[in-house]
Every structure is written in structure tokens, then in C-alpha cells.
Amino acid sequence: MKIALVNPPHTAIGSRIPKEHLPPLGLLSIGGPLLDAGFNVKLLDAEFGPMLLWDIVREVQRFSADVVMMGHSGSSTAHPTIVELSRLLKLTMPRLIIVYGGVHPTYHWNEILAECPEIDIIVRGEGERTVLALMTALSGDVPLNYVKGIAFRSGNDIVASAPAEMIRDLDEYRVGWELIEHSRYSYWGGKRAVVAQFSRGCPYLCSYCGQRGFWTQWRHREPAKFARELARLHREHGVELINFADELPTGSRKAWKAFLEALIAEKVPLLLVGSTRASDIVRDRDILHLYKKAGVIRFLLGIESYDDATLKRIKKGGTTTEDQRAIDLLREHGIISMATYVVGFSEESDRDYWKSYRHLLRYDPDQVQLLYATPHRWTPFYKTVEDRKVVLADTRRWDYKHQVLSAPGVPPWRVFLWFKAIEVLMQARPKVIARTLFHRDADYRHAMRWYTRIGRRVWFHEAFEFLFKTRLMRCGPSLREFMGRTLENREYALSKKSMREVVTEA
């Protein structure tokens, strides 16, 4: 059977403005096992261009695909595009089997199958093992209900099979790097780049996180094997930068330290960027020199709020003091700190936005990324904001860069003004400009200048879009009326064996 892995075009600003692209790791991760099982697999990355939907259809036809598998790292915001593309594909290829996976369909499987008859099967949770079982079933005479971790139609009914078991050994399946031309993918100002994943999951209970429950439990790859893979990508394909897809790559100090030491031993000039928690940076203050020596150039830290009470309410599990210390430690070791700060966790006033700005000034991060609180139905956070009013109906723009929920007493135009003003004021500080121009580390200067260029383009694009393209609702429905009730009971997507079962097997 011929399988087309389709990465659809995305409407998010981040996908359009930088004019640089990173490979779709999720599709490559299922592509490797499918290739190893003998299937004919092709990746179509429609982010390039971006491709028009009818052009995607023609490419799938040219390949004579039997199955199309779709998913996107943008998940919820890419969903409307995937639905539209599915309808066009089935219009021209009615016998085509369309399989849809990712975070959004994992939780909204019943609604999607009810509303979009063109989508045949949904993969729930991580897909490597599931797609192999699914393709075996589709290739033979195996009933779909024997395949764990999927949802499908059976007659007039929508059926979900038993949850798939969590993959404990992340080295059991390989990434299908041969499906891409590495020369097409770049990041960080033209550096050849890939997305990679050392670990999956996160043990923390942040109520707003749309990823934590998807992976169910934190796990990591074998450190030395992962380091060898990254070194091979550099030596054989000229990869210069690794963008970690992990929620928490540093979750285990022992494993992370082993990875850093193994990568240093490989002696490859890679740059590493990713996200982690401030508490892990503080924990690792005695080995941050290894971070730097291995190539870590920037870590994104989820600062989220200036208020410890808010951090406690959203179960962030950190403190403002810890956040400040982490930024200082990264600077001492020549590693860029990017602070993400979220607007909208509570019903904020103008005074709150002013306090947020003052708080960020005290932190003094190298880079700042402001985001809007965006509710996902399967997270605990959703239930706490169900009664707030929705101001933006276009879910393609629920990408953390557009205001979704109203702020009582502060109209959207003023929220936007605060948002954009804080970004400008933070990045235009004299000390930030001085670091950008005169820092002793050339990689540091390059990163700061690249981010400044990208940020300037995105800033004006967002301002133009808000003024002339965005349609906000003055008196919108409540979140519950607009999206439905919480799906919090579905938060954990995968089945994991009990410790007793693991010991018995061993």
C-alpha cells in the first residue's frame, strides 16, 4: 500500500512570517516505522509555498496513494484546514483512506468523525506503534476494533478502541529522516535545522498545558544513542541546529547530563534550542558549563505570570524568585533566556498589564515572547474559564498569538495595545540592544539579531492584521456555549502499565 504523509499548510503567523521551515517531526516519527515495515511512504510538506489545497490533491493523485495520513504540530489551529483538505481529497479520490492524528483529534475524535465523514480513522495518542497495527489491519482482513488507540465508524456508530499502551522505550522506533531533503529546512537565520525529541511528557500539573496528558508520562531516549543520532545528522546532512520538541528535555538531571557529555564527546558544532523549566536551570547550576559546551544557545522559560497566586492557581509549580534566578544563571553562562509571558489567565485590568511590564523589566530576560491564554477543552484550565466570553470565533487563529477570551473592563483593542507595547519596550531596552551588538559570543549576537529581525516583521504583521483583518465579537458567547463542556476526563490519552505488570514481565 502507498501511504502519503501530508503536512498541511498552517495559518499561524509563526508559520508564514519567518520564511524558514522546520521538518514535521510527528509525521517523520511514524514514517520511519512504516518504511521499516516495507510500506511505500512519501512525505508531502505543504508548508512550503504554502501549497494550495488543490495542488496538494494533485500531488496525492500523482503518487496514487491508497492512504493519506495527516497531522500538524499546530493541531487545533490546523484542524479546519485538514477538514477542508479531506473533503477535496475524497471528492477526487473516493476510495482513499484518510487517517488523522495529533493532539486535537486525540481528544475530539467523536465530534470529528460525526462532522466530517471524509475522515475515516483517527489515531489517538502517540502513533508509531498504532499506525503499524493499523496498516497491518488495513492490508489484511483484521477488524479495526483489534487495533488499540484508534477511533472509526462501524456502520452508523462511532467507535473508539481501547487506548494504546504508552511506548516506554523511545528508541524502539526510528525517525524517518530519509523522507526529507535536509537542504530545504532551516531556522535561526538560514542554519540547516531539524526538530528532535529527547523525551516525551512532563510530570508537572500545569492546568493549561495541552500537551501534558497527550504523552501521559515523562520518558526519555537513551542519552548516548540520541547524541550519536544528532551527530550523524550533522556529519551526513550538514544539520547545524537542533530544535527540541520536548516539553521538558531536562526532566532527569542524570539523563540530561549523560546526553550533554555524550554530545560533547562527539565533537560536532551543533546549536541546541528548546524549552525547559526555571527550576531545572536552578537545579543544574553546577553543570550549566556543560550546557554551553554541548551547544545550548537558548532556553525558553515559561514565566507565565508576575503573581505567585496565579502561578499556584494554574499549578505551574514554580515561583517568581526561581524564575529570576534561572534567567541570571543562563546569562552568567552565555545562554540566551527567552521568557514567555501569558496574558489572560485571569480577568486582568490595565493595572495588571502595567504590573506585568514592570515584572518583566525586573527579570531582564534576553528575549520576550508574549502569549494569550488559549483554552483547550481537555485541560483542567478550560473548566475554570468556561463562563468567560469568547471574542474571536475563527479557531484557526487560536494559536496563542490572538486574544481568545475577553478581559472585562478592558476592550480588545487596549489589550492588544498593551501586548504589543510591552513587546517593543522589552526588546528596545538599551541593555538588550547592547547585548545584541556587542556581546562577546558570535553565536549569541547572531541569535539576538535574528530574533530582532523576525520579531520586527511579526510585530508589524500582527498590527496590520489586527487593524484590518481580524473580526472580534463585541458580545460573544461564553466559552461553554461556543466550544461545549469540558473534556477533562479524557486528558490522559495513553494507557500505561502498572508497576506490578512491569515487574511481572521483567
Image (cartoon, rainbow, N blue to C red):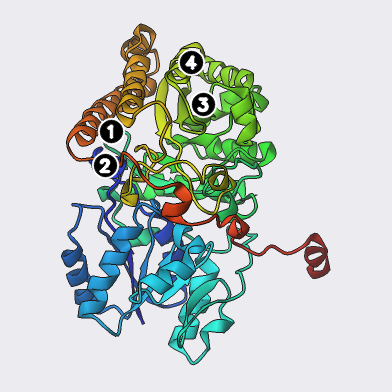
> Mark 2 or mark 4: which is in front?
4
Question: Which residue is depicted at the point 52% across and 89% down?
Answer: 142
Please identify the residue farthest to the bottom as the structure is shown: 141
> What numbered label is drawn on residue 20?
2
**Disc 2 + disc 1, Cβ < 8 Å:** yes
Q: Earlier in the sequence, mark 2 or mark 4?
A: 2
Residue found at the far front of this picture: 475
Looking at the rendered structure, the kind of residue marked 1 is Gly
Q: CA distance from mark 2 to mark 1?
A: 8 Å
Q: Is residue 458 above or below residue 144?
A: above
Q: Which residue is mark 4?
A: 355
Q: Is residue 238 above or below residue 458?
A: below
Three-letter amino acid code of the residue under disc 4: Lys
**Residue 330 appears left or right of 427:** right
Pick whichever, 36 or 98, lies toward us: 98
Going 62% across and 58% down the picture, which residue do you hit? 489
| Amino acid type of the residue tagged 2 in the rendering | Glu
Disc number for residue 292 = 3
Task: Give how far apart the Cα atoms at labels 2 and 4 are.
Answer: 35 Å
Dot 1 or dot 4: first in sequence order is 1
- Marks 3 and 1, how far apart at CA: 20 Å
According to the image, label 1 marks what residue? 189
Quadrant containing the N terminus is: bottom left
State the residue at coordinates (56%, 55%): 214
Q: Residues within 10 Å of mark 3 (few under 14, many from 20)?
A: some
**What SS does tag 2 mark?**
loop
Instruction: Give the spatial CA distance, label 1 vs label 4.
Output: 33 Å
Give the CA separation, mark 4 to mark 3.
33 Å
